[in-house]
Amino acid sequence: MNWNLNDLYKGFDDSYEADLKKLEQLLNDYKALVKNEKGLSDLALLEGYLKSQEDLERLATSLYAFASLTTSTDVTNQVALGYMARLQQLLSSVTKENVQMSRFIAGLDLDSLEQQSELVKTYRYGLNLTQTGAKHLLSESEEVIYAKMRQLASNQWSQLQGLLTANLNVDFEGKQITLSEVRNLAYDHNKDVRKKAYEAELKSYEPIADAVAMALSNIKREVTELNAMRGYSSALEKTLEISHMTKETLDAMIEAMKDFRPNFAKYLKAKAAYLGHQKGLPFYDLFAPIGKLDKTYTFEEAQKIVLDSFYGFSPRLGNFAKKAFDNQWIDAFPRKGKRGGAFCSNQPQIRQSRFLLNFTGSLSDVSTLAHELGHGYHGDVIQDEQPLNWDYPMPLAETASIFCETIVMNKLFNELEKDEEKLSVLEISLQGDTQVIIDILSRYLFETKLFENAKGPISKDQMKSWMLEAQKAAYTDGLDHDLLHPYMWLNKGHYYSAGLNFYNFPYAFGLLFGKGLYSLYQQDPQSFLKNYDRLLGLTGKASVEDVAASMGIDVTKKDFWVTSLNEVNKDIELVIDLMKKTV
């Protein structure tokens, strides 16, 4: 169950090298275009720019994806790492020209040009964003210097974290296992295994904690310095801008999440009592399976569950998942040298996707499979758009994935008859909701603290302390404060991107937006199906608020988020009731 990348390239061979040379030529052609020695009109220059960006998007996506996906399953692959560095250098070689074009676009009358060009009309939303972002540009020489130095700074710090965690040996009961494997033991049915795995995981971090803390500290310091130079008030302001989302929307959602902390604490304390704990729930039992669905799933069983669920929603969704299974788009199982976690990499230029999992057979893994395939379905819809509209902002990136998760978990739940089985399935779903709302809140609070202190070095001890504070604030008394997880900053790759700060709240947005969408689907399935793909298609060419408005949803108001959270609260009450019945 390893993925096949042959539709991208069969290796770093003559074909790959030929496309690299083609990329160099496209970049040189772009540089010549920006010089505008032919004296092109504003419209001709703008259209030429957009066409060149389309060509670069198609080719660079394939080249970079092949190298990046190769390193994802073999983090020590020096050939792939070398090509990634080479690509970064090539793409950064046009930084000066990108700045010049952004300033050129900032001075254009787009209203007038749109009337003269279908191409400008197609990319109007992105051009508006370019005009907005142009005010934060540094000088051309400064942008060039930063683009080059970033390859030696934050990009390398990020790779260091990936390298150290992917190759980390964890001593578990006398055996050396990977970090992904020991973290997956949090889902084990044996309470002693869960506790020992938690203890082994925490102990394994100690030798690398100083180095990873230095990596995270330096990434956040770089971001802080650069944002100040660009005139942003904070990293959050920049993130909201690239998220196509207003602070009003974020604040409404965060406040609703905070208001519902007691509801989640009620669930966690009930689970603690169910498992025989006297205080709050120990961190190592957050993912403890309960009920009597005492089974693990083969990957083949997981496929069938997902396909049945997806076909029950729509033929297109089911056909997409079948295509992913049949064509080796999925790298399923953990192994040494493979990065942890799970992700989807959409490749619209070849009308495909690739999925990385670390599947061990838990019900949670089945849910993760559905989640990542949801990302792929989003990519399947978006590939029908024009190339410069393929990218969508972080908050909307989770829309289809959460929706697909919900489809699968609801189908499993509705097919069960015994209370103990229903409890098991519903509680697995609630575990995920708790992570995406409450744990995400802790990550948001932690990263806020990081940036508040990012003008100087930050030690591992400070990070551990702030993580514990964030967990206490988010989980309140739902968790046992003596058994938290001080190293949750170390294993989450999302903290380690200089270009994607606060990559936490988009998950909460995706979950709650998805819950709201699912509620609309239940009310009128046929009408919903007509509009759902249109909504996904809009995500690369409209703001978060406008995409939501296309379905009649106002995300700037707290009321919407409370309504979605009330849907989650129904599950909380049902899980607590089922625990009482089956204890």
Image (spheres, helix red, strand yellow):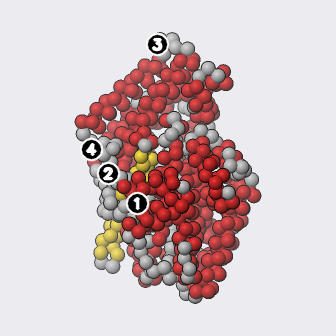
User: Could you tell me how far apart the alpha carbons at marks 2 and 4 are, in whole angstroms?
Assistant: 11 Å
Quadrant of the image for the C terminus? Answer: bottom right
Residue at the spot of label 1: 357
Name the mark nearer the viewer: 2 or 4. Answer: 2
Residue 376 location in percent, x, y? Answer: 47, 51
**Real-space Cα separation, disc 3 to disc 1, in angstroms:** 50 Å
User: Alpha-carbon neighbours of circle 3 within 10 Å: few (<14), some, or many (≥20)?
Assistant: few
- The disc placed on residue 4 is 2
Query: From this viewpoint, is residue 227 visible?
Result: no
Residue hosting label 3 = 37
Q: Which badge, 2 or 3, is on the more N-terminal residue? A: 2
Name the amino acid, label 1.
Answer: Leu
For marks 3 and 1, the one nearer the N-term is 3
Q: Assign the N terminus to one quadrant of the image.
A: bottom left
Disc 4 to disc 1, C-alpha distance: 22 Å
Amino acid type, label 3: Glu
Q: Who's the residue at 72% across and 62% down the image?
A: 562
151 or 372: nearer the viewer: 372
Reply above or below: 582 against 174: below
**Cα separation between marks 3 and 4:** 39 Å
Q: Is mark 2 on a helix, strand or loop?
A: loop
Total marks placed: 4
